[in-house]
Image (spheres, helix red, strand yellow):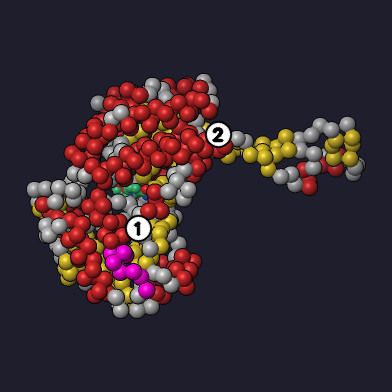
Amino acid sequence: MKDNKKESIDKLVRAQRTYFRSGVTRSYDFRMKALNNLSKLIRNNEAKILHALKTDLNKSEAEAYTTEIGFLLEEIRHTQKHLKKWMVPKKVKTAKTHIGSKGYTIAEPYGVTLIIAPWNYPFQLQLAPLIGAIAAGNTAILKPSELTPQTSKLLDELIKEYYHPDFIAVVEGGVETNQILLDQPLDYIFFTGSVPVGKIVMEAASKRLIPITLELGGKSPCIVDETADLKLAAKRIAFGKFTNAGQTCIAPDYIYLHKNIRQPFIDTFKEVIKEFYGENPLQNEEFGKIVNDRHFNRLKSYLSEGEILFGGRYDETSEKIEPTLIAPSDTSSPVMSDEIFGPIFPVMEYESIDEVIEFVVERPKPLALYLFTINKKVEEKVVNNISFGGGSINDTLMHIATPYLPFGGVGESGIGSYHGESSFVAFSHNKSVLNQTNKFDFSFRYPNAKYGLKII
Ligand code: NAD
């Protein structure tokens, strides 16, 4: 079985390499057509996509549309609008030492690329990097998560229907399949997933020195100071924390509240949760489920690690956990050291912003950071003293949704970035070319030569 899979993957990589070397993927027209095709694939199959996401994750239509389908269509539109400009070779200045020559850079495609996706936004996180791969002129092998089987199967069917496998193909499977894929002579790997698997991917890539992008996770802090608009902050934070039942890589992981607004914020936050999800979120059809038993049980275990301030109920059958606020009893317990990735929200209190900065910089660099304040000094202090992938001031999640901001982590939360032009850059090698003049020559560069300039 394993041998069969390996054989078929070896064959696929060879076929994609031959196709890439034929040069067809490089032209502007080819890239634009392939992007049109992706747009059609999504628009013509919306109902099927929504159904797969509902089955795998109980995603509501509205949420699935904004965070998966709409997001991709906008990213394709933006890429098509700017692609011509991004593809133009860029002239660079000539240094005095290089007088007479011309320098330029060309964005060249890497070749055969592999895109590995996680389960939490299984459609969007598989296809958003693909937009960059196509735009940059590569071929691509997609590996969806085995934890969202309906979406994985649908992706396989749709990609087969809309693309030739020598150009784009899906390989379904779990860890074993990934190991076979990571052992291939690929030209580029784009991985989205957890920190531990990110390390495995980087190790595998290092054996062949394959360039990579790692979009990983971690604990993203959310800070609310005493100048924040509490009602607005509560709404925007609840949106960021409970979308997809908290299973979002950039969801606020824990919240730090200034002591003067701690209680009023918590009261407002409880009201907002009721407004959004009703008195019983476990019965609310629109509220997401936890992806599987393992994650459900992991999340349940956090509920005993502190005082429950709100929520705390769960339903074993539907694998749902209601929005929960918890005051952790110990900052070294798993709820404060693991990435939560669920609707449980630890609440911390601070007096001086320096305490928060110290707490955050002592830990791995977060993927996202959120700060609610109208105090410019606090904003500058936080932004300039904490290293994080990206973030929003007075909002959550929204920085990911604009194609003009590169999206990615730093340190343990990832390497490299994408979205918009950054995706094109991520999937391109920036090749430098110096075009030297033949009109004259500096003889002093040669051994044993007399100093001088020879006009040819
Ligand atoms: P994961 O790392 O378990 O799995 C991701 C992919 O890796 C899957 O396709 C899976 O099949 C494969 N995989 C799993 N174990 C492997 C192994 N031992 N060897 C080789 N491949 C393996 O991640 P997940 O649970 O699917 O997703 C959740 C994680 O992803 C969270 O940490 C989250 O923060 C992160 N994430 C990051 C982003 C981002 O954009 N930075 C987005 C979404 C999720």
Residue occupying image coordinates x 30% and y 51%: 248
The answer to which quarter of the image holds residue 452 is top right
The residue that mark 1 highlights is 396
Disc number for residue 34: none
The answer to which quarter of the image holds residue 365 is bottom left
Whether residue 136 sits left or right of residue 261 in the image: it is: right
Residue occupying image coordinates x 26% and y 46%: 63
Dominant secondary-structure state across the stretch colored magenta: helix
- The magenta segment is 227-234
Residue 229: in magenta span: yes
Q: Nearer the viewer, residue 336 or 369?
A: 369
Q: Badge 2, how many Cα within 10 Å: few under 14, some, many 20+?
A: few
Q: Position of residue 419 (x, y in %)?
A: 44, 44
Whether residue 328 sits left or right of residue 28 in the image: it is: left
Whether disc 1's CB lies below 8 Å from ligand 1 is answered no
The residue that mark 2 highlights is 84
3D distance between C-alphas at marks 2 and 1: 32 Å
Q: Nearer the viewer, residue 125 or 374?
A: 374
Residue occupying image coordinates x 23% and y 68%: 268
Is residue 231 shown above or below 455?
below
Q: Badge 1, how many Cα within 10 Å: few under 14, some, many 20+?
A: many
Q: Earlier in the sequence, mark 2 or mark 1?
A: 2
Amino acid type assigned to the residue bearing label 2 in the image: Lys
Residue occupying image coordinates x 63% and y 39%: 90
The answer to which quarter of the image holds residue 61 is top left
In what element is the residue under mark 1?
loop
Residue 277: in magenta span: no
Whether disc 2's CB lies below 8 Å from ligand 1 is answered no
